[in-house]
Image (cartoon, rainbow, N blue to C red):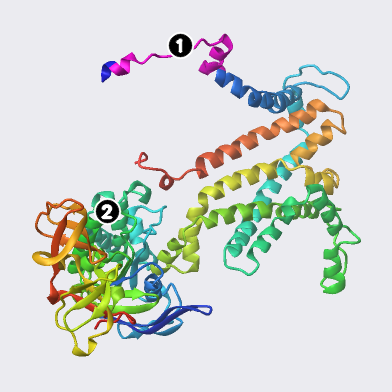
Amino acid sequence: MTIAAEARPVPQLSQSWLVRLFDYKPFLIFICLLPAMGLLLVFLSYPLGLGIWLAFTDTRIGRGGYFIGFENFESLWHDPVFITSVWNTLLYTGVATVGKFALGLWLALLLNNHLPFKSLLRALILVPWIVPTVLSAIAFWWIYDPQFSIISYILVDVLGWRDTYIDFLGSPWPARWSLIAANIWRGIPFVAISLLAGLQTISPALYEAAMLDGANAWQRFRHVTLPMLMPILAVVLTFSVLFTFTDFQLVYAITRGGPINSTHLMATLAFQRGIPGGQLGEGAAIAVAMIPFLVLATLFSYFALARRKWQQGEDND
Amino acid sequence: MASVQIADVRKAYGSTQVIHGVDIDINDGEFVILVGPSGCGKSTLLRMIAGLENISGGEIRIGPRVVNDVPPKERDIAMVFQNYALYPHMTVADNMAFSMKLRNAPKAEIDERVSKAAGILGLTNLLDRYPRQLSGGQRQRVAMGRAIVRDPQVFLFDEPLSNLDAKLRVQMRTEIKELHQRLKTTTVYVTHDQIEAMTMADKIVVMHDGIVEQMGAPLELYDHPNNLFVATFIGSPAMNLLKGTITADGFETVLADGAKALWPIGKHPADSNGKAAVMGIRPEHLMLDPNGLAAEVVVVEPMGSETQVVVRCGGQDLTCIFRERITAKPGETIRIRPDTSVTHLFDAATGKRI
């Protein structure tokens, strides 16, 4: 039997050098990665690198600049508008994230129940998210208008709770809270739908077991829902923080950083200084100053919130 | 510990009624198994006892108390779910202690009860593990541990062994039975596997399409099935059924070519002569007899301790189990005879026992 197997001739293929080259694994890997690497290099690494380079120059629009070291950062350190924008960004991100998560989780829990028209409601929830940001910004612009605001109209003319119309965008603190409210409205759908997806992966049997174990509604939420939701909550939280921290459109469309530069976020200030202001180097420096915050937020969620011990397998004893 | 009374219990989803008036009395300390094919309402009934489903009609009592409107956590029951429903983010110890922690029981008492339950179930070395780090059988034990720690009036099991492999299932079957003999807690156990029912139960309740077909001790059901459904559902391999007519001389079946075969039967009511009926013979009640009916061997399945043979006899395939070793090959003819003292006769129209 073995002799018969050996006797079978192995066909000798004569392959061209091109075929042999493509059979060479390292070359094949390189060729397959090339398109993706090219795209990333051109559209991600190059702009990022250019931005970081510009931050260390005094480039203006229409005039190449020179390397000036940390001069841009030094002047920003003493710039009250920049410092305000940093605090604004932190406040904006902090309050809006808390608001989005509180309301989004609440909405997700409501939608997880058996409701009539459930799928229609779920689709409606997504509306704030799919509307173009600038469009919703214009809507908020009207809602916050000093003369035609529907909120003022209801409070003053319909309910009579106030005597004067509210000046939403005319002074710093009301303007900040107004922007935060708009951002929360826009961010809720993302949080709600993501958390709803997370909620639906929790086995109903766990709630039944908890019910039999004697847990009331709050205890079921506290001991079953919340810990089971934690992994997805961490991911959504990270994304939400990053998006909110780098937000530009809402603020630029509603207040343009005003009144008197009091609502500038780092992103809007970077644009303001860089493009309309023409100081490309300074604008880039402001944008680069966001990087440490973003890295910190990412690391925090990666280490503090990511995988839990209970999610891992046997190897993690 | 307590008895459980189920009186005329009904369940309807909208206009569809799935349980049509079920009466079951479960004595204190009894191990009762609800068995039936899927969709027969056995799990729904168990969930109604647990309080996870509303009761549409009738009454359920645990001990002296009617529990129809009592929320699950106040019924003093513990349930083991099919998929175990262990809390994945808690260790084995925390899983077992959860109900007591909710009750704010003192820590010493919690520790004592958890370690006692862990000792009973052989989980002592696994208390710090998470459910993901356990095998199927270990998870199953943790689920039982969680129930034991509660020290409830009634244990409810919802198909607890169906996620385990065959070997482990046999082992856990013994463990559950042993556990019951040790704790003597009233137990209601749901399964679709009649072997589980036969081996473990004090009392089997056979359900079908939302009604109770028969209830009784395992061997009582096996030896005296009330109707065709119970006759075929209990026992593996299933009972052989022959359609025919009862006559004064025996049971007459008609072959495909119009010829008739006469089977000897035991005592039967005189007024049943001439009635269309179904005769049931358990595989082990067919025996080799040189004077019996000729039967052609179709398949021979040696099991070691016994031999299972499928034969074609009187135009029907019959399954036989012989204690003796059979050397016959497929195609050969053997002669068989039913043990007339243990054949069963059922009315062909109603399926009821004659």
Q: CA distance from mark 2 to mark 1?
A: 52 Å
According to the picture, the residue beneath numbered tag 2 turns out to be: B166
The reply to whether dot 2 and dot 1 touch (C-beta < 8 Å) is no
Subunit of label 1: A
Disc 2 residue type? Ala
Q: Position of residue A270 (x, y in %)?
A: 78, 34
Q: Nearer the viewer, residue B7 or A170?
A: B7
Give the numbered dot on residue B48: none
- The amino acid on which the numbered mark 1 sits, given as a three-letter code, is Gln
Return the residue nearer the eye: B171 or A219: B171
Identify whether B1 is placed above or below A5.
Answer: below
Which range is magenta? A4-27
**Dot in front, 2 or 1:** 1
Q: Residues within 10 Å of mark 1 (few under 14, many from 20)?
A: few
Corner quadrant of residue B153? bottom left
The quadrant of the picture occupied by the N terminus of chain A is: top left
Q: Residue at x 74, y 23 (%)?
A: A50
Q: From the top left corner, tell me how far across and down residue A212 is, in percent.
A: 39, 69
Mark yes or no: residue B151 visible.
no
Residue A6 among those drawn in magenta: yes
Q: Residue drawn at (69%, 35%), measured in percent from left and top? A: A290
Q: Are marks 2 and 1 on the same chain?
A: no
Q: Secondary structure at mark 2?
A: helix
Q: Position of residue A27 (x, y in %)?
A: 56, 16
The answer to whether A297 appears left or right of A123 in the picture is left
Q: Is residue A14 above or below residue B51?
A: above
| Mark 2 residue crowding within 10 angstroms, few (<14) / some (14–19) / many (20+) | few
Q: Dot 1 corresponds to which residue?
A: A12
Which of the chains bears the disc numbered 2?
B
